[in-house]
Amino acid sequence: MPIAIGSKAPDFTLKTVTPEGLKDVKLSDKLGTKKTLLLFFPLAFTGTCTKEMCGVSGGIGEFAGLDANVLGISVDSPFAQAAWAKENKITVTLLSDLDKKVTAAYDVTFKGLAGIGDTSSRASFVISPSGIVEYAEVTATPGDLPNFAAISAAIAK
């Protein structure tokens, strides 16, 4: 069960790769002016994850044009994420939760994915500018995409 709607979103600092090198991204630094969408996904270089992040980067339907910070989070290394993003033209900021602490804090651990180990579930959270969870979703399986219409409505609200 993911963290509840109406609760304070756990703050975190995770790594991303930029043209200048590794950079820290802190959730609380993204808050204040607009909503933030956290998209947890199991693993880079997999079919559904690529479809999701490429779709978000390309502005899936009504998701396009919404004013929100979008952060993709997985348990991959930031270097694997950067290679995947480059190969697939993914423009979403990807954050590495290699130690799985943020995945645990949001209670979205997927145990034993394909027999290879624990990853993040496919999960979505819309966080208000004040840091409150306004929307939370964990898909039934890692192969299911999130409900982008519901996410869009939560961001637009």
Image (cartoon, rainbow, N blue to C red):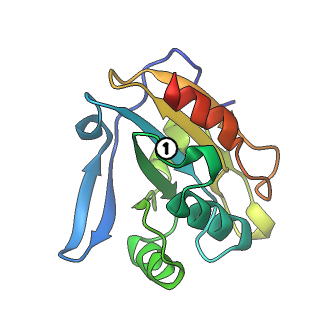
Q: Pick out the residue farthest to the left.
A: 20
Left or right, 27 with respect to 23, comes to right
How many discs mark residues in the rendered view?
Answer: 1
Give the camera-side residue of 65 and 30: 65
Above/below status of 144 relative to 62: below
The picture places residue 153, in percent across and down from the top left corner, at 60, 29
Q: Give the residue furthest to the top.
A: 6
Amino acid bearing label 1: Leu
- From the top left corner, tell me how far across and down residue 38 is, in percent: 49, 43
Q: Secondary structure at mark 1?
A: strand
Residue at 23 percent across and 63 percent down: it is 23
Residues 71 and 101: in front is: 71
Question: Is residue 55 rendered to the left or right of residue 38?
Answer: right
Looking at the image, residue 80 lies above or below residue 36:
below
Is 77 drawn above or below residue 41 in the view shown?
A: below
Residue bearing mark 1: 38
